[in-house]
Image: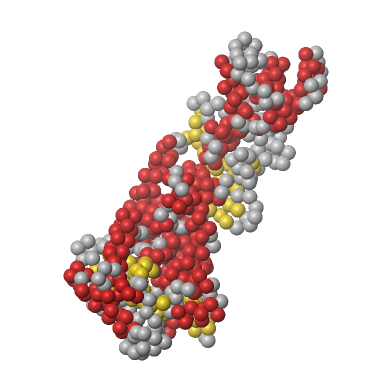
């Protein structure tokens, strides 16, 4: 049974999600920035050019779920993969990491922007504009593992993008060894997209019609499905709840559970309710441990870090209880001023205020065009058999 | 209409009538349900009221119009209902004509449904119908066309409908209303509008009903020739 009844709330939540998102202009800027880095790393006189390198986005930037950092300034994390065609037999993780880091340091600009070396990434901080943090993840194809994935039932288009990455804390970090840390951002994104493809296509068609353009002319990043918006709202809600803590439920866990629970709802309130209620159903148990399976790598448990620290699992459940309660309170509340008071601590004052303002403007213009009292003109006379 | 378009229309409706919901159970049709609280005015008289309603959206909406049921059981069955219990908002062609002006859910509710509910509330309160009512059955349809064309002569009204039933509109033909003018300069505009609302087959069945009615009520003479056409 589908029951859509709070379109006012959907409007406001849509606006909040929009506020949290990367604005179109910044999206284009981010693409320019990372393509420039990719060029420096892999073109011209770069020594890496012989390994046919490619740079591509991963994580929330690729999923379309970028969420503004919670804080004073508008800051966004853009996660990138820099993949070069080297074999695990030919390089150690350390060497790969160093190849990329050295090339970055050769550039006067990037050298200055380079943050302290991360566990897996090189991070460029665009200090002046204070907007982007570009995380660059050095990677090579995980060729042999792609076969393993396929034998585990992962569809080949998802398996074929599996990569091997570096990790300073990995036991094999500085020696040549077939055992590398692995991930599959493109495969994961393809899976995530498959969870929302119906609404994605419907929205794309709707936008093309509104723009009077071909469907292909609508840029991907301008389409935001209720799943993507729900993920943005959920992430922000978590960020606020754990703002004073060092640790918080992982984005990948929340995103995966949300995508699994999403069932093609086209209304945001419906989608968010379905997701929040459904998320726990997708946490299974394996050998007595909580298990959130990576949908494109069945042997990977996104919740394995819950074992590392006692409170982690509880953090998730505390958060889940909180967002469920917050959401139900919202659904029951019909007073617009009270809605503001409820949304404010959930998503932050600034975004809530802007969203409420947009809603009031919208409601006013829409209702003004037809006054609240319906004037009856030339009515039909009732008739019957 | 796809779900997303219907949703867009519902959002507009919901903005004005927040107690309505858009619902669907499994494979059933979409329906709009809940309390319709409205204020409406006609000739300077305002009525505020509330009805529990269910508006069923047909698969072929907006080409096929929604059906409305009243869930609060305030409106008795003998007040303009169809046999299946849905509200009879007007002669079918009349409702289509009205709906066409703003073919959205909000348009349907404001232009077709609320006037009907207003007239019931008004009748209960003041004892009469605020904008009259059509006779039941075929005579009502004939009356509707008469009002629409602003004509009284039934024979001429039938000829007007005949043009639609035979799909035989020619703008240089003389208008059957008796004005002596050509169609394009007279009733052409309203006929052309009507043509967009239903098919000649549908006009033909109305035409046949009307003729059968006229024959049955023993108005013979000039109409018998029409009846013999046997379409
Ligand atoms: Zn005429």
Q: Is residue B26 left or right of residue A373?
A: right
Q: Of B176 and A315, which appears nearest the observer? A: B176
Quarter the C terminus of chain A occupies: top right
Please, is residue A183 above or below residue A89 in the view? above
Residue at x 56%, y 55% (from the top left corner): A3
Please, is residue A284 above or below residue B8 in the view? below
Residue A178 on image: x %, y %:
41, 87
Residue at x 73%, y 25% (from the top left corner): B207
Q: Is residue A278 left or right of residue B159?
A: left
Q: Quadrant of residue A233?
A: bottom left
Please, is residue B26 above or below residue B137 in the view? below
Residue B132 on image: x %, y %:
62, 25
Tag count: 0
Residue A154 on image: x %, y %:
53, 75
- State the colouring used for the structure image: secondary structure
Q: Is residue B93 left or right of residue A162?
A: right
Q: Of B2 and A177, which appears nearest the observer? A: A177
Residue at x 32%, y 80% (from the top left corner): A96
Residue at x 53%, y 58% (from the top left corner): A198
Residue A185 on image: x %, y %:
42, 71
Quarter the N terminus of chain A occupies: bottom right
Q: Quadrant of residue A73?
A: bottom left
Please, is residue B109 above or below residue B31 in the view? above
Residue A57 can be seen, yes or no: yes
Residue B121 can be seen, yes or no: no
- Point out the residue furthest to the top here: B180
């Amino acid at each position: 049974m589908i029951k859509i009844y709070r379109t006012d709330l959907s409007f406001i939540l849509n606006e909040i999600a929009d506020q949290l998102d990367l604005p179109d202009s910044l999206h284009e800027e981010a693409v320019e920035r990372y393509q420039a880095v990719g060029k420096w790393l892999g073109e011209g006189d770069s020594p890496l050019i012989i390994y046919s390198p490619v740079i591509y986005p991963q994580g929330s930037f690729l999923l379309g779920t970028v969420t503004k950092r919670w804080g004073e300034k508008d800051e966004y994390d853009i996660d990138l993969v820099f993949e070069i065609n080297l074999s695990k037999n030919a390089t150690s993780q350390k060497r790969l990491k160093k190849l990329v880091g050295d090339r970055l340091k050769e550039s006067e600009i990037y050298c200055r922007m380079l943050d302290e070396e991360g566990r897996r990434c090189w991070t460029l901080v665009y200090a002046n504009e204070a907007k982007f943090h570009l995380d660059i993840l050095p990677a090579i194809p995980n060729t042999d593992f792609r076969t393993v994935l396929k034998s585990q039932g992962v569809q080949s288009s998802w398996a074929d993008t599996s990569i091997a990455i570096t990790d300073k804390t990995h036991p094999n970090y500085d020696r040549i060894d077939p055992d590398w840390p692995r991930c599959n951002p493109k495969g994961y994104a393809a899976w995530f997209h498959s969870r929302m493809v119906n609404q994605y296509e419907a929205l794309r068609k709707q936008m093309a019609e509104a723009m009077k353009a071909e469907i292909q002319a609508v840029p991907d990043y301008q389409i935001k499905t209720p799943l993507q918006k729900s993920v943005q709202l959920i992430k922000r809600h978590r960020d606020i709840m754990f703002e004073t803590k060092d640790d918080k439920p992982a984005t990948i866990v929340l995103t995966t559970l949300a995508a699994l629970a999403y069932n093609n709802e086209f209304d945001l309130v419906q989608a968010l309710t379905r997701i929040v209620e459904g998320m726990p159903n997708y946490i299974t148990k394996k050998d007595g441990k909580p298990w959130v399976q990576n949908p494109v790598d069945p042997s990977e448990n996104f919740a394995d870090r819950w074992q590392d620290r006692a409170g982690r699992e509880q953090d998730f459940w505390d958060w889940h209880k909180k967002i469920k309660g917050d959401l139900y309170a919202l659904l029951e509340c019909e007073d617009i001023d009270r809605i503001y008071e409820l949304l404010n601590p959930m998503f932050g004052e600034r975004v809530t205020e802007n969203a409420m303002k947009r809603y009031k403007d919208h409601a006013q213009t829409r209702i003004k065009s037809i006054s609240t009292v319906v004037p009856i003109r030339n009515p039909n006379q009732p008739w019957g058999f | 209409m796809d779900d997303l378009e219907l949703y867009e229309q519902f959002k507009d409706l919901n903005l004005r009538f927040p107690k309505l919901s858009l619902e669907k159970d499994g494979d059933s049709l979409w329906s709009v349900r809940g309390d319709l609280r409205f204020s409406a005015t006609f000739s300077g008289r305002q009525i505020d009221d509330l009805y529990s309603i269910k508006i069923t959206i047909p698969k072929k909406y907006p080409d096929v119009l929604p059906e409305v049921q009243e869930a609060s059981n305030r409106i008795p069955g003998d007040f303009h209902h169809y046999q299946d219990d849905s509200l009879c908002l007007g002669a079918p062609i009349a409702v289509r004509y009205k709906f066409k002006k703003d073919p959205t859910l909000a348009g349907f509710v404001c232009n077709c449904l609320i006037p009907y509910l207003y007239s019931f509330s008004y009748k209960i309160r003041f004892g009469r119908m605020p904008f009259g009512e059509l006779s039941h059955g075929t005579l009502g349809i004939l009356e509707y066309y008469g009002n629409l064309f602003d004509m009284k002569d039934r024979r001429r009204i039938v000829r007007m409908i005949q043009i639609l039933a035979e799909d035989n509109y020619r703008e240089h033909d003389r208008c059957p209303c008796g004005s002596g003018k050509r169609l394009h300069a007279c009733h052409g505009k309203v006929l052309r509008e009507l043509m967009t609302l239903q098919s000649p087959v549908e006009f033909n069945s109305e035409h046949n009903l009307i003729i059968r009615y006229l024959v049955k009520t023993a108005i013979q003479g000039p109409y018998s020739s029409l009846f013999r056409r046997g379409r």
